[in-house]
Amino acid sequence: MNPLPRLVATTVLGLATLAAFAPAQAAPERAVAAPVASPFSGAELARMKAGAARVSILRDKWGIPHVFGKSDADAVFGMVFAQAEDDFNRVELNYINAMGRLAEVEGEGELWRDLRMKLYIDPADMQAKYAASPAWLKKLMDAFADGMNWYLVTHPQVKPKLITRFEPWMALSFSEGSIGGDIESIDLKALAAFYGSPPQAAPKVEKVALAMLGNGADKGFDEEPKGSNGFAIAPRLTADKHALLMINPHTSFYFRPEVHMVSEEGLNAYGAVTWGQFFIYQGFNERLGWMHTSGGGDVIDEYLETVSGKDGRFFYKHGSEELPVRSKRIVLPYKTAGGMASRTVTAYFTQHGPVIRAENGKWVSVKMMDDPMHALMQSYGRTKARDYAAFYKVMELRTNSSNNTVYADADGNIAYFHGNFIPRRDPRFDWTKPVDGSDPATDWKGLHGIKETITVVNPKSGYISNTNNWPCTGFGASSPKCADYPAYMWSLPQNARGIHAERVLHDAANLTLDGLIARAYDPYLTAFEPLVPALVKDWDALPDSDPRKAALARQVAALRGWDLRWSTGSVPTSLAVYWGQDMVKNAAPRARAAAMPVVDFVQGRLTGEERLAALARASDKLQADFGSWQTPWGEINRFQRLSAAVDAGYDDSKPSFPVGFTSANWGSLASFGMTANQTTKRIYGDRGNSFVAAVEFGPRVRAKSILAGGESADPASPHFADQAAMYSRGEFKDVLFYKDDIEKGLERKYHPGE
């Protein structure tokens, strides 16, 4: 126990004073026993067996599961079962992380990540939300738990890391499938500094900087964006006068598998599902499709809290009032070499949310969306919408906080929603920075209605695009005027992909599925447009007596003649990417200090001397690693899948496939970047194009897709890497959407557990 010391006076306290009486966080306590699996009762087993009998899983020639159930709940049962078959490890890890239990598996190093989750996820609270959920949603959550548990029952050889029994309420802990959830904006180092020892001031970090800057830039690679591309094309610009949708999430590879779920209650959804969730996150049904891109409005705010102490309690100022700080003891179990131990932390909350760090003598609390029940309702509900009106009604739940939505349907409509959950705030304040929590004017004032947010419906331009950039372009002459909206309605700037997308779509005409795919893989690299001419000018200005004139002559000649297009056989692509990476590595600290995207900083802030020096270093690195700076890009940039491990690792001596497309940071619409610590000479992609699909909404929906590697995580499976070569070439497979087509390409049909 850590009771608060008694305070003798009421004062507004500076940080040093607060530190003196803030409760010290507990040291590791007594060892606790490892969790024990709960046995399933006979009634539970009978219920699960009956549920399995109502489900058929049809695996096609690519191993894609097409799940058919009598009810939506049956389809959910079969869909999560199929996911567990393909990669139970990732399913379980997602829930371990979502519930704040990663340290129980990985050890003490994950304590603060667990605390971050447990500031929002409490089993008792989730159980209460489950009890309050609509009956239809409860049925789906029940089916989710039964499907996962039936997998464990029928696969006794599988040994879970932690979760030996799934409960329905667990679905509420993981209700939104984005690659970068809102909670990840809370800095773990600052959280640990505040709760791991007496609170200390944390460095000031603006939200804009967090959103724009990659934390991996110091490795020499600007971190591959956690983002996506979404395109929608109106019928008048297509060959067959049907709307087209391009679904191109840029996630870590194997983050989402490809799944199809069908029920006799009107469900017929196909697309990508985040491991462990029971709804299609990005995909389509026979009438419409949806694609999410990250980076909508500013939806997370930090508050500087003026805290004082009285009679052993904390209070914070709000207007003329002194309100009590709520405290909560959170137990954090963790794995040790000898078993299990735990640490107890006293967490603090104001009306704005949990306290996450200290800054300049204040405590900082954070406010973000926290409505898992409605978020789950919205995530599932959009998969069953059959027209724009129904989809819009689902959007009115306004619980999609981290994403934009690109939409297309069989009626010929295309639409774009920039964000969805947008708090209404006083525009006088700069919401990119922490605001004064003691001023009631900074409180949220409800949510903006969808009609008040940045939306585009059936633009005259005939196309929609978003690449995690601002909404001020991407729709041709139909683009919204951002100045007409509060600044907090959009949070990210333009990027190189956004410029590229506008160019490949502005003159679209008579597009087919293949034509849309070709534009989504257009090889031009817009980020090098200002860089290469500047470098050429730098070199031209060197006197003949400068040794760099001769040393870099051939490199500059190669870049001077380059058409700025990637290909596996391109030497200038190799040179440009290594040159760009070197500039990024050296400029990253200054870019962060300037709160600029590092590529923008490199384009506009470097000197000629810096550009030339970076080219020399890039040439030397290529020479050292590959024997020549004139190495074709495909010899360097490779796709490789060696194991099912989340951190699989790479090996230059093992087989791999050449890939032409580059990191999205350089403007490549097709994205392929490396975020793992590079221990190889070659670059092996692990984030970017993952599940990609192009969809045509005619009387009979048509689609093509590709998946990084393959559907299964089992290296022994024929579907572990059966799409790898196609993926590397940007070659798509035909989606088998209708049952007669599925049966023609059928590999196996079975009930879960057979």
Image (cartoon, grey):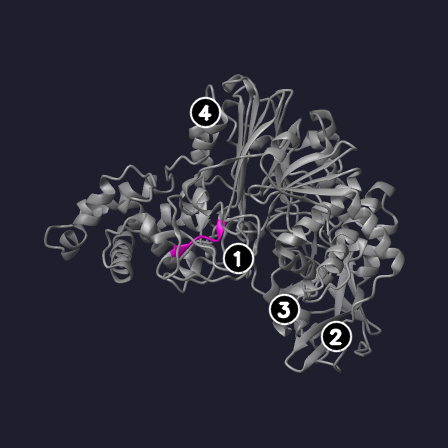
Residue drawn at 67 percent across, 63 percent down = 158
Q: Which residue is mark 2?
A: 34
Provide residue 259's location: percent of width, then percent of height.
63, 42
Q: Name the element at disc 4.
A: loop
Q: Residues within 10 Å of mark 3 (few under 14, many from 20)?
A: many
Q: Quadrant of the N terminus?
A: bottom right
What amino acid is labelled 4 in the image? Answer: His
Between disc 4 and disc 2, whose residue precedes?
2
In-image side of 438 versus 468 (left or right): right
Residue drawn at 32 percent across, 39 percent down = 564
Which disc is residue 110 wearing? 3
What amino acid is labelled 3 in the image? Answer: Glu
* Measured Cα–Cα span from mark 1 to mark 3: 28 Å
Mark 1 and mark 4 residues within 8 Å of each other at the beta carbon: no
Which disc is residue 506 wearing? 4
Provide residue 193's location: percent of width, then percent of height.
62, 70
* Measured Cα–Cα span from mark 4 to mark 3: 47 Å
User: Magenta region, mostly helix, strand or loop?
Assistant: strand
Mark 3 and mark 2 residues within 8 Å of each other at the beta carbon: no
Provide residue 182's location: percent of width, then percent of height.
65, 51
Residue drawn at 61 percent across, 72 percent down = 109
Report the front residue among 314 and 53.
53
Indicate which label's residue lies in the foreground, 3 or 2. Answer: 2
* Measured Cα–Cα span from mark 1 to mark 4: 43 Å
Between disc 1 and disc 2, whose residue precedes?
2
Q: Name the element at disc 1.
A: loop
- The relative height of residue 276 versus residue 478 in the rendered view (above or below) is below
